Image: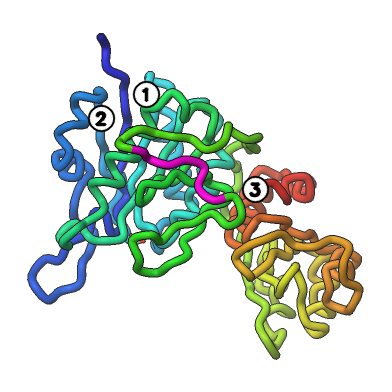
Amino acid sequence: MDLPKLAIAALGGTVSMQARSAGEGVIPTVSGETLLASLPQLRAMARVTVETLGLLPSASLDFEFLLSVLGWANEQVEQGATGVVITQGTDTLEETAAFFDYLWAHDEPLVLTGAMRSADQAGADGPANFLDGCRVALAVESRRRGVQVVMNGQIHSAGAVRKTDSLALQAFSSAIVGPVGLMVEGNVHYLRPPGQRTVLPVPQRTSQNVALLEASLSADSLLLENIVALGYDGLVIGGFGAGHASERWADAIVHIAEKIPVVIATRTGSGSTARSSYGFIGSERDLIDKGAFMAGFLCPRKARILLWLLIGCQRQDELEHHLTPL
Ligand code: ASP
């Protein structure tokens, strides 16, 4: 029987990090080929191709590089891959997952995974996550689920997953909905059927800048008032509670929203923005009246990804339509 084809790419991150010598900090040095060599059992599961597309800490990934990775992943599927696995740093995994998911037009799964412990640490989780990621990417049940994040025995959907712990092994969670699936004795077990997905065209433009500011107590409005003059094409605010801002910020937002799209998300880490509950200046009702859009369940970072992509494919008119699903 022909084994399925599995395409793997390494981008860097802790999963590929180790120290050059004792006492030094870890840096990305371990190639995809070396990662793969640590899991000989994979060769019995699939015809595996592996490429090291980058050796970067995930804080230094950027949208243009991710578009080139997407191009590589598209090619793999077009050439017959059953699934694609990308290893990268966990610090921005929730953002890259959303980025790829908005652009992933295939039924074949695209799985992102990484590690919380570096390759040279005792109890390194990289190999286990990598193997689980490959299992998820090869599972027929994973089709039509878009991009998923596999970490610590859990499968998370790209729209909901967030890094919610800085160093713990259990660093990823999906607020309200929880993981979409689990690894059980090496098998992929989904807890719910695939949901509706939004797929956008690949952006033609990549020079747009979308700012992300977080509301905070007694914050000045210096940056906010200059956001348009600074050349930003869009603004996302991690708002208080259900999508709120101070009076001072509300006064600035009304002028900004006349010029560029403004999205208000919740900075709480869980739950949706409101639409019709509060009426004070800076409330969601007031900010909607002032021309802002409410992000719904989309967290500030994912809302910024969405807005950047929509501006890039000249579809910002559709913004409201895309704000709400998990
Ligand atoms: N601590 C990060 C990680 O887990 C570093 C990075 O994101 O590259 O991979």
Q: Is mark 1 within 8 Å of ligand 1?
A: no
Q: Position of residue 107 (x, y in %)?
A: 52, 26
SS at circle 1? loop
Residue 98 painted magenta: no
Verify whether residue 183 appears in magenta. yes
Pointer 2 residue = 49
> Would residue 281 appear left or right of 26 to someone viewing this image?
right
- Label of residue 215 in the image: none
Asked which colour scheme the image uses, the reply is rainbow
* Observer-nearest of 218 and 132: 132
Contact flag, marks 1 and 2 (Cβ < 8 Å): yes
Q: Is residue 258 visible?
A: no
Q: Are the residues at dot 2 and dot 3 in contact (C-beta closer than 8 Å)?
A: no
**Residue in the image at 41% along x and 61% along y:** 171
Q: Which amino acid type is shown beneath numbered disc 1? A: Ala
Type of amino acid under label 2: Thr
Tell me residue 275's x, y (percent). Answer: 84, 61
Mark 1 sits on what residue? 81
Q: What residue is shown at x 32% (from left), y 28% (from top)?
A: 6
Residue designated by label 3: 326
Specify the amino acid type for callout 3: Leu
Binning the other alpha carbons within 10 Å of mark 2 as few (below 14), some (14 to 19) or many (20 upward) gives some
Which range of residues does the magenta coloring cover?
Answer: 178-184
Specify which label sits upstream in the sequence, 1 or 3: 1
The Cα atoms of the two marked residues, 1 and 2, are separated by: 9 Å
